Image: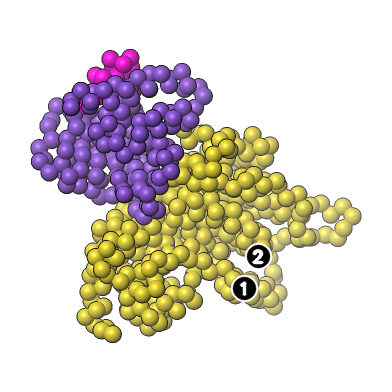
Chain colours: A yellow, B purple
């Protein structure tokens, strides 16, 4: 399909028809990406393919590594120089990268990683899924850390979050994961790309730039003494507190008077919107909250909404992972139900509407106000 | 306003491009639009489909169980989508390759021998574009002029020599439906 390749050439139009994968790639390039290292895997390969041409056109580094393990370690090295670097993969490839991701977290490097999630576990399939929620928010690698995790629900958000990812990564000197899914990666929508930003040649004061005329700098994740390690652990935790305070992001619809709050992110959140609109047409007081950051999870707002709603319905493309975070956020104030599809099956609006109606009926019977 | 289209056929019949072309035209018309492919482990000769949703409001789900319109280019696609079209919807059938008739009475069937008409125009490869001309004449959600502009705007440079035959294909499809009355 040659139409895909027009991106980046057509700068005159405000909105372009863009595939999610290509939009992320082009947005990263325009945000000043200096080096990309990766390895192909469906459903994110167009991202790598697009950069293989565009990065070279712009005189920047594109390298298809021999494996995901090599790619993430190249990212580790390049990020140590203070350059904007990125890699992308899909679920099984992210698993392979986890050791490197932990080293990057232990070295406080501002790296952006894109996970276009697919069905699993194992080789699974190439269909859209959200089975990696725990992996990206809880266990992106061994040791005590959480990346910042952004979850786009449209091609425009995929673009905006890519730009945001680099800014957050550098602001906090922290890893950012963009957790998309196969549907976001493969879908085309009109969207607007950012202006091309020049590469920032000013390197941060920790970057390895050659110690000519200055003292040495060390990028490492090794702390042999328990005390030093704990001090470093505390530094990460303090930063995470700050991130939790400042960076919770979400979108809301019809939450002013909702009796039932539907919560979903990414593709599931977007499809839930259609179901919520349909429920409203039927006169049901249903609202939608779509987390845009999975870490930090928008639990302050969810907790606030739990004060004046009767129940929650969480919709995910997995067996129920974010639902745990919702339970933690509402702290037992209201009942939390779940509707999910697995295996790369994307839930359709009519199924979600049915789940909404089921949940709603039980709420009005058991908790009259 | 929300219109939903499924385009389905053998890989190589141009259903993905057809959906993209409609999506471009809808975007240029100032509408909201989503295009999503079936991207399973498919191969040339297998059946492929894409879904296009066009609306004047932000689009929630880009996929639908029961589309308002299905455009089918081969028998397996006809068999799959005939039962799925929404009541009062439309199924556009490439009758040059599909001999079966639509048996549902609660939907409209538009039979267009797109493959044969494309041969008349000069190439079997523009059967998809013939069908789009026919479809947008029967269901004028987007002006055909927009599609022509989208072809001019989005065909890559090395394919510009095919503009004329694509324009002829659009016209042939439109003419066929107009002649049906």
Q: Which mark is residue A172?
A: 2
Residue A342 on image: x %, y %: 32, 58
Indicate the chain on which mark 2 is placed.
A
Q: Is residue B132 above or below residue A228?
A: above
Q: Is residue A140 above or below residue A362?
A: above
Highlighted magenta segment, given as a residue range:
B112-126
**Which of these two is toward me, B153 or B45?**
B153
Q: Which of the two labelled residues, at mark 1 and mark 2, occupies the earlier sequence position?
A: 2
Residue A21 located left or right of residue A307: right
Assess disc 2: are there few (<14), some (14-19) or many (≥20) residues with their C-alpha within 10 Å of its C-alpha: some
Circle 1 marks a residue in which chain?
A
Is A226 colored magenta in this rendering?
Answer: no
Q: Is residue A1 left or right of residue B65?
A: right
In front: B171, or A223? B171
Q: Position of residue A252 (x, y in %)?
A: 43, 66
Residue A113: image location, x then y, percent: 56, 54
Closer to the camera, B25 or A337? B25
Where, quadrant-wise, is the N terminus of chain A in this rendering?
A: top left
Callout 1 touching callout 2 (CB < 8 Å): yes
- Residue that badge 1 annotates: A242
Farthest residue, direction bottom: A369
User: In which quadrant of the rendered view does residue A324 lie?
Assistant: bottom left
Q: Residue at x 25, y 58 (%)?
A: A350
User: Count the marks: how many?
Assistant: 2
B77 left or right of A226 in image: left
Position of A161 relative to A302 (above/below): above
């Amino acid at each position: 399909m040659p139409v895909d390749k027009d991106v980046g050439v057509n700068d005159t139009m405000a909105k372009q028809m863009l595939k999610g994968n290509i939009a992320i790639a082009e947005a990263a390039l325009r945000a000043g990406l200096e080096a990309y290292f990766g390895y192909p895997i469906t459903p994110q390969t167009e991202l790598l393919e697009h950069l293989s041409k565009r990065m070279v056109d712009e005189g920047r580094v594109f390298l298809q590594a021999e494996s995901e393990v090599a790619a993430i370690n190249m990212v580790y090295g390049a990020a140590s120089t203070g350059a904007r670097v990125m890699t992308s993969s899909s679920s099984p490839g992210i698993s392979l990268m986890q050791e490197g991701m932990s080293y990057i977290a232990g070295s406080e490097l501002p790296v952006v990683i894109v996970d276009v999630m697919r069905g699993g576990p194992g080789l699974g399939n190439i269909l859209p899924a959200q089975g990696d929620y725990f992996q990206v928010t809880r266990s992106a690698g061994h040791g005590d850390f959480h990346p910042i995790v952004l979850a786009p629900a449209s091609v425009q958000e995929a673009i905006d979050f890519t730009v945001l990812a680099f800014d957050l990564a550098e602001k906090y000197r922290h890893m950012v994961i963009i957790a998309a899914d196969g549907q976001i990666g493969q879908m085309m929508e009109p969207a607007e790309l950012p202006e091309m930003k020049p590469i920032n040649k000013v390197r941060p004061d920790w970057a390895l730039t050659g110690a000519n005329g200055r003292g040495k700098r060390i990028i490492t994740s090794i702390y042999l003494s328990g005390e030093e390690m704990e001090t470093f652990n505390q530094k990460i935790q303090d930063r995470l507190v700050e991130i939790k305070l400042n960076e919770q992001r979400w979108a809301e619809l019809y939450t002013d008077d909702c009796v039932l709050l539907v919560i979903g992110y990414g593709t599931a959140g977007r499809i839930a919107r259609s179901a919520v609109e349909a429920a409203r047409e039927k006169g049901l007081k249903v609202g939608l909250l779509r987390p845009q950051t999975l870490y930090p999870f928008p639990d302050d707002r969810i907790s606030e909404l739990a004060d004046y709603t009767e129940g929650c319905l969480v919709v995910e493309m997995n067996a129920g992972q974010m639902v745990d975070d919702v339970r933690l956020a509402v702290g037992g104030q209201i009942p939390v139900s779940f509707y999910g599809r697995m295996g790369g099956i994307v839930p359709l609006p009519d199924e979600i509407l049915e789940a909404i109606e089921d949940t709603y009926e039980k709420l009005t019977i058991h908790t009259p106000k | 306003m929300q219109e939903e289209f499924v385009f389905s056929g053998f890989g190589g019949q141009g259903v993905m491009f057809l959906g993209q072309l409609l999506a471009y035209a809808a975007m240029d018309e100032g509408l909201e639009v989503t295009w999503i492919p079936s991207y399973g482990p498919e191969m040339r000769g297998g059946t492929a489909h894409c879904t296009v949703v066009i609306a004047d409001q932000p689009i929630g789900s880009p996929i639908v169980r029961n589309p308002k319109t299905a455009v089918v280019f081969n028998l397996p696609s006809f068999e799959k989508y005939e039962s799925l079209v929404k009541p009062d919807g439309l199924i556009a059938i490439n009758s040059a390759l599909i001999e079966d008739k639509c048996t549902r009475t609660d939907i409209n069937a538009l039979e267009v021998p797109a493959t044969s008409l494309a041969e008349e125009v000069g190439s079997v490869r523009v059967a998809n574009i013939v069908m789009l001309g026919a479809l947008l004449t029967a269901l004028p959600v987007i002006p055909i002029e927009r599609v022509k502009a989208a072809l001019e705007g989005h065909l890559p440079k090395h394919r510009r020599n095919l503009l004329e035959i694509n324009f002829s294909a659009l016209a042939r499809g439109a003419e066929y439906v107009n002649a049906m009355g």
